[in-house]
Amino acid sequence: MGSRGTAALPMSFNVIHIFMKWKNDREVYESIGRFCVDFEQVCRSMEACIRTILHGKGLTNTAIQEILLSSYTADPLRALLHSLIGQTVVKGKTEEEKICSKIFGQLQELINHRNDLINSKWYVIGMEDGKEKEVLGLGVKLHANKKGVATKNFKLKKAELDEFIKQCREVNIMISLLTRCVMGVRNIRECFKVQ
C-alpha cells in the first residue's frame, strides 16, 4: 500500500480499503449520502407497511402507531414487519413463506451493508495520479465476538456502492408490493416469484 496517508493509523487496526477513481472527493461523500437517503426510504416503507397492518387490525390511532414505532431502527423494523407479514399475509402458506424469506433475507443483507458503511470510521484522502485523482478511503470497523477481536475487513468500490443504492431501490419496491398484499390489492404470488 505504500506510505501515502496511512502512517497516522495504528498498526493494530484492521483496515477497510477503498480504491476508486473519482473526479473529486465530493463524489465519495455524495455517493455515501445517496445510499443513506435511499436506505432511509426503505425504513419509511417498512414503517408504512407496519402501520397499514396495525390500522387494518384495529389500531387506527396514528399517534399511538407513531409512539410504538418511534424507537425502532432498521433491524427491529425488519423483524417486526417479517413477523406481522407472517401472521397476516402468509399464515402457513409454503410458497409465500419462501418468497418472504427471500425478501427479508435481501433486506437483512442491505441492513448489514448499511451498518458496515455507517459505523466505520472513514479517512478519505485524495491523491493526484496523472490526470485523474485517486481517492483512497480507509475505514475501520472494530468488532468483537466470543473469540475476541473480529474486526471486519472488506473492500468497497464505487461500483459496489452504486449496487447498494440500486438494492435500496429494489427492496423499497418489494416492500411497497408487500404493502399492496397487506391491503388485499394483490397477492404475494402475483407480485413475486421464487427463483
Image: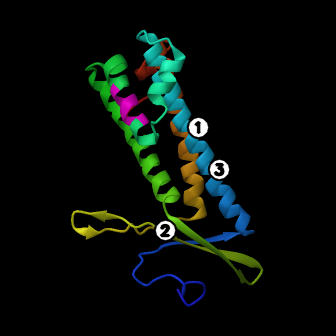
Question: Is-magenta flag for residue 95?
Answer: no
Q: Residue type at mark 2? A: Lys
Q: Residues within 10 Å of mark 3 (few under 14, many from 20)?
A: some
Residue 172, position in %: x, y? 54, 35
Question: Is-magenta flag for residue 80?
Answer: yes
Chain part drawn in magenta: 77-83
Q: Which residue is more in the foreground, 68 or 48? A: 68
Can residue 45 be seen here? The reply is yes
Residue 35, position in %: x, y? 60, 50
Between marks 2 and 1, how big is the CA–CA gap? 25 Å
Q: Which mark is residue 155?
A: 2
Q: Which mark is residue 41?
A: 1
Question: Principal SS element in the magenta part?
Answer: helix
Q: Tell me the SS state at disc 3.
A: helix
Between marks 3 and 1, how big is the CA–CA gap? 11 Å
Q: Earlier in the sequence, mark 2 or mark 3?
A: 3
Most extreme residue toward the left is 147
Q: Is residue 89 left or right of residue 71?
A: left
Q: Earlier in the sequence, mark 3 or mark 1?
A: 3
